[in-house]
Amino acid sequence: MNISVLGCGRWGAFIAWYLNKIGHNVMTWGLSDAPQFIELRDTRSNGMLTFPESLEISDDLGKAVSRAEVIVISISCQALRSFLADVKKLDLSGKSFVLCMKGIEEGTGLRLTQVVKEILGDVPVAVWVGPGHPQNFVNGVPNCMVIDSENEELKRKLVNDFSSELIRFYIGADLIGSEVGAAAKNVVGIAAGMLDGLGYGCLKGALMSRGTHEVGKLIKAMGGNERSAYGLCHLGDYEATLFSKFSQNRMFGETFVKGESYTKLAEGVATSRAMVKLAKKYNVEMPIVNGVNDILSHKISVDNQLAALFLRSIKEEF
């Protein structure tokens, strides 16, 4: 299969490497002036993995799109709308899209597949979500992930074509739940990092329990299946997001409460603002999401928010 991976950051580079490794004809695309692209172009390595000669590298978006049957997008989710405006200018007939980002568009509260449909029209689009870090995958550590789509034929084909001994893919059954759950786990990841930074890691059990519960309520209110919050898109991704040293959202939360700077992308920051809007729109109580957003926007101190979340007045658990 001819596949182009648009975006060559940490995750995008791994996806290109992985899909090439399991036998597909892959091209990776990046902006010509992006440091990640320049490093890959000049050295065929990003310090984590090395591209074989069979994996083509290009900064020509038209070429990358025209050659591919399947177009995988792995960029910052908040940049998706503007990026798709350029993709829309190209011939997209017969092409399918796979989104490998986890987030909600901040300005609109739209899921990322909704953004695709709004800009590109009725193109086949799927999401690739679930646990796993490139640093583990390239060292041969396997994991399970999910591909979901409203297009039944597309998601089954992708699961069949993308699965290997390194990644076992499951067929998603709830696109709303898969997208919202995957986005929300980044917000919970920031909360976990805040607990780590304060020395309260023992509260992660409560965070996991309550976080899954409130995300499930939002998924249900949005028309999805609340059980999705307990699947690989959300709860199943907690180990990688709430505990791993490779989790950028967890690291962001930890450095934030310590007053330190963190320069890597943490998608949960913008997603927390988007999910506050969704919680209001669907009238769902989401104390963890609201608490993270209040702390990040300096509306409330971390200590006060912790008390509000975990030391609240007596109430029934469910």
Image (cartoon, rainbow, N blue to C red):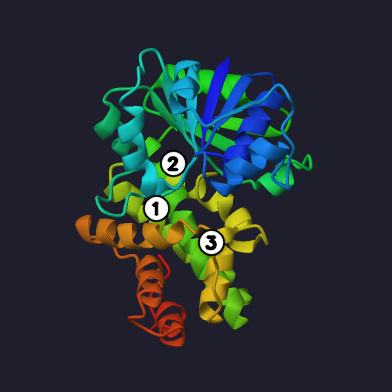
Q: Which residue is rendered at x = 49% and y = 23% of the image?
A: 64
Q: Earlier in the sequence, mark 1 or mark 2?
A: 2
What secondary structure is found at the residue carrying circle 1? helix
Front position in the image: 119 or 247: 119
Up the image or down, 172 lies above or below 108; here it is above
Relative to 17, 83 lies left or right? left
Up the image or down, 256 lies above or below 274; here it is below
Q: Which residue is rendered at x = 54% and y = 73% of the image?
A: 261
* Whether label 2 touches label 3, CB < 8 Å: no
What secondary structure is found at the residue carrying circle 3? helix
Pointer 2 local density, CA inside 10 Å: few below 14, some 14–19, many at least 20? many
Quarter the N terminus occupies: top right
Q: Which amino acid does label 2 sit on?
A: Ser
Q: Could you tell me residue 269's position as x and y percent?
A: 42, 62
Q: Which of marks 1 and 3 is in front?
A: 3
On the image, numbered disc 2 is attached to which residue?
178
Q: Could you tell me residue 167's position as x and y percent?
A: 67, 34
Q: Earlier in the sequence, mark 1 or mark 3?
A: 1
On the image, numbered disc 1 is attached to which residue?
216
Q: Tell me the quarter of the picture where residue 299 sits.
A: bottom left
Q: Tell me the quarter of the picture where residue 56 sits.
A: top right
Front position in the image: 155 or 10: 10
Up the image or down, 94 lies above or below 167; here it is above
**Residue 249 got which mark?**
3
**Residue 236 got which mark?**
none
